Image (cartoon, rainbow, N blue to C red):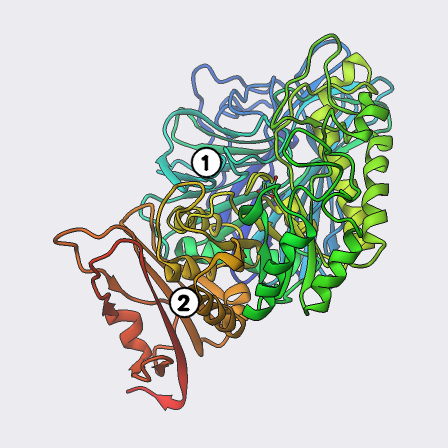
Amino acid sequence: MTGLIQFDEKTGVFHLHNQQISYLFAVEEGGLLGHIYFGHRLKDYHGGRAYPRIDRGFSGNLTDISERGYSPDTLLREYSETGFGDYRLPAILIKQENGSQATRFTYEGYRIDKGKPKLEGLPATYALEEDEAETLTVVLVDAVAKLKLSLFYTIYRDRAVITRSCRLENHSDVPVFIDKLASMTLDFTAQPLELISLPGAHVNERQLTRETIRYGQKRLVSRRGTTSHQMNNAAALVSPQTNEFFGEAYGFALVYSGNHAIEIERDQIDQTRVVIGINEEQFSWQLSPKESFQTPEVVMVYSDKGLNAMSQTYHDLVNERLVRSYKHQTRPILVNNWEATYFDFTEDTLRPIVDEAQQLGIEMFVLDDGWFGCRDDDTTSLGDWFVDKKKFPNGLSHFAEYVHSKGLQFGLWVEPEMISVDSELYRNHPDYRLEVPNRSPLLGRQQFVLDLGRKEVRQAVIEQLESLLDQGFIDYIKWDMNRHLSDVYSARLDGQCQGEVFHRYTLGLYEMLEYLTSKYPDVLWEGCSGGGGRFDFGFAYYMPQSWTSDNTDAIARLGIQYGTSLFYPISTITSHVSATPNHQTGRLTPFATRGDVAMSGVLGYELDLTKLTTAEKNLVKEQVEDYKSIRHLVQFGRFSRLMSPFEDNRAAWMFTNADKSEILVFTFMILNHAQQPIPLVTLNGLNTDKCYQNVETKEIITGSELEYLGWYEALSDKDFVSHRYHFKEVKGGDSR
Ligand code: DGJ
C-alpha cells in the first residue's frame, strides 16, 4: 500500500493525502460523516477542526444522541440527506414504500484498495498502475429502509485530484424510487467564495462567468438530455482574490453527458455547500430489491496557485488518465467541407478541394453532413447511414480511395442519435423515436431523437455504422448531435419508470460509444453537438477531441477557447480557420489572426480552399508547415492563460514544453482605440535563470526579463491583430 489514505480508529478520522493535497472527514457520534478539510497538504491532523457543538435555535437534535448542540443543521457533512435536521441541499432523496423521502445513513465500515476500479457502464478517470492511486470506499447504511450507500473516493499519488462517486444498493424486499442521488456533497467553512461557471448558448459556448456566492441557492443545470451549450457541467469555487496565478481554487467536473445539476448554497452562518450529480428534475429511478445504482464521477481539483494551476491539473489528468485513444498522439490537420459547401456537393465538386488540400500540406479531408440517404437539406435521411448514389455514383469508398491516393486521411460525419421522418429507418420503425403517447412530438432542426435507452434501437444504428467502418477506409469520425431531447418518454418502459428515460438515454449512448470506440480504436473520434454542446469529461473518455463551437469567428473564439481551457486541455479543443466575412458573425478578420486562433487549438480549415487567393494559399501553406513544427507543444504542452478576453480588449496565452526550454506565446488585440492603453506582456513559468532566443528575431533575452519585465506590445492601427512569439532556451546560456 502506498499509504495515501489513513483511518485513525481512535478519532474516526479519514485522511486522504499526497504531496499536494489533503482531504479529511470523520465518523461523528451517531455514525454521521462530518467533513473536516480539503486543501493544501497537511502532514498530520490533531483535531483542530472538531466541529463546535453549539446549541442553535430551530435546529433539531438527533434523538439517539444526548448532546443538545449536536445538530445536523449546520454540521459540515460528507454526504447530505433530508428528513433529520439538515435543512440545506440534500444529495439523496429516496421515495420509500411508505411515501417518505427521509433517510438516515450511518457509518458501517470502510475499505481501502489500490488503484481505481472501473465504474460499470459509465466513463471515468482511471489509474494505469496500482500504486498511482488508492480508493477508499465508505459504507453507510439506512437500517430502516435497508439501503446501503457506498461513497467512493480516489486520490492519485501525484495529482491534486480527488474523484468521488457513490453507489446505492437496495437490500430490502420492496422497490424504492431514487428521486435524487448526487455524486457528492462538499461543505466549506464560513468564508467568502466566488463561483466561476461556463454558461453559454449555441455558437457562444463556455463564456467564463464569475460571481459572488450569496445567501440562498444557485443551480447550474442542464434539462436538455445532454451537457448543453447553455451550461457546462464543470465549475470552480475560488477565493475573491484568486486570479490566474495566485489564490485558492476548487474545481469540479462531472464525468457525464446527460442532465446535470451543480448546486451551491450559502447557509445561515456563511458556510457553503456544493452538491453535484445527475439533475434530479424529471429523474426518478426504480431500484428493485438486490439492484444497485452507480452515480457518475466528479473530479475535484485543488489549487493554491490560481486558476492556471487548477486547469493544468485537469489538462494533465484528461490527457493521461481520461482519454483512451489517440493519447498523446498528434492530431492531423484537416479540412472539413461544411462551411465550404454545406449540403451542396458531389464527388466531382469535392475533388478540387482535396487536390488543393494536398498542395497545401493538409493531412485529412472530412466529409461533413449530406453524404448519405438523399440528404440535400436538413429535412431528410438521418438514420440511413448509406451513401447517396447521386452524389457519389461509385460509392463512398471510391471517393475515400481518391482522398487516400492524394496522401490524405479520410474522415466522415455522422449523427447517429437522430432520425428524420423522411428516412428508411423511420418508415420501418416509426416507434424508434422518443415520443409521448397521444402528443405530437417536437421537431428540432427537422429531426427527432432516437430512444437510445432501447437495445434494438442502438443495434439498428450500430449495425449500419459497422458496415461503414468495417470497410476500412474511414480514419476519423465526427459524431454530431444537432438537437436536444424533448418528448422524453420510452415506449418500452412502464409508466412509473418514465423518470429513468433521460439517464437511460445517456447510458445507452455510452454503451454504443464503448462498443464502437473499442472495436475501432485506430479511428480518430471527434465529439460534436452543434459545435460544443457536449464538451464534457464523459465524452472525452470516448472521443479525444471535440468540435468546440459552430462559431468559427476568430474573435468570438478567443472567449470560447479561453473559457473551454479552464477545464479541458488544448488537445481536446478543435479550431478551424474559416472564410471571411465569417458565416456566423459577418466579421472580417485578417487571415493571420484567424490562423493564430485556430493554431492555438487542434488546427483545421473549414472553407473552400479552391476559392482562396494565391496570397492566402501561401499563408495556409505557411500556417500548416508551421503548425506541424509546433503542434506537439500546442496540443500537449503546458497551457497558461495570460490575459482574459472576458476582462479586457485583448487576450494572450502561452504554451511551454516539459523542461521549459521552448515557449510559444500568442497575443491578440481585439479592437483598436484612439489612446489605447499600451499592453504589457509578461510570461509565466519560465526558467528564470536561463536565456531564451526569439526564434524569428534571434534576439537573446533572459528568462527573468520575459517573466518579470516583459515587453510592450506594438500598437496597430487596425482591429483584430494577433502576434506570435516563439522562444527557445539557449543551451549553456545561463543568465546572470
Ligand atoms: C453541426 C456541426 O457543429 C457542424 O460542424 C456541422 O457538422 C453541422 N452540424 C452539419 O449538420
Q: Mark 2 and ligand 1: say if the CB distance to the nearest ligand atom is below 8 Å.
A: no
Quadrant for the N terminus, please. Answer: bottom right
Q: Amino acid at mark 2?
A: Ala
Q: Which image quarter: residue 101?
A: top right
Q: Which image quarter: residue 238?
A: top left
Residue at (44% x, 67% y) in the render: 614
Quadrant assignment for ligand 1: top right
Do the CB atoms of the residues marked 2 and 1 lie less than 8 Å apart?
no
Q: Say left or right for 321 vs 144.
A: left
Q: Say left or right for 638 vs 343.
A: left
Element on which disc 2 rests: helix
User: Percent from the top left, x then y, of residue 7?
Assistant: 65, 50
Quadrant for the C terminus, please. Answer: bottom left
- Compare residues 357 and 103 and report the one nearer the observer: 357
Asked whether residue 8 appears in the rendered view, the answer is no
Asked whether residue 37 appears in the rendered view, the answer is yes
User: Percent from the top left, x then y, of residue 602?
Assistant: 54, 59
Question: In the rendered view, would you say 386 is above or below 39?
Answer: above
Q: Say left or right for 608 vs 416.
A: left
Question: In the rendered view, would you say 721 is above or below 443?
Answer: below
Question: In the rendered view, would you say 647 is above or below 733?
Answer: above
Residue at (77% x, 52% y) in the render: 396
Q: Which circle's residue, 2 or 1, is located before the other in the chain?
A: 1
- Compare residues 666 and 303 and report the one nearer the observer: 666
Element on which disc 1 rests: loop
The label on residue 615 is 2
Residue at which label 1 appears: 200
User: Percent from the top left, x then y, of residue 722?
Assistant: 33, 61
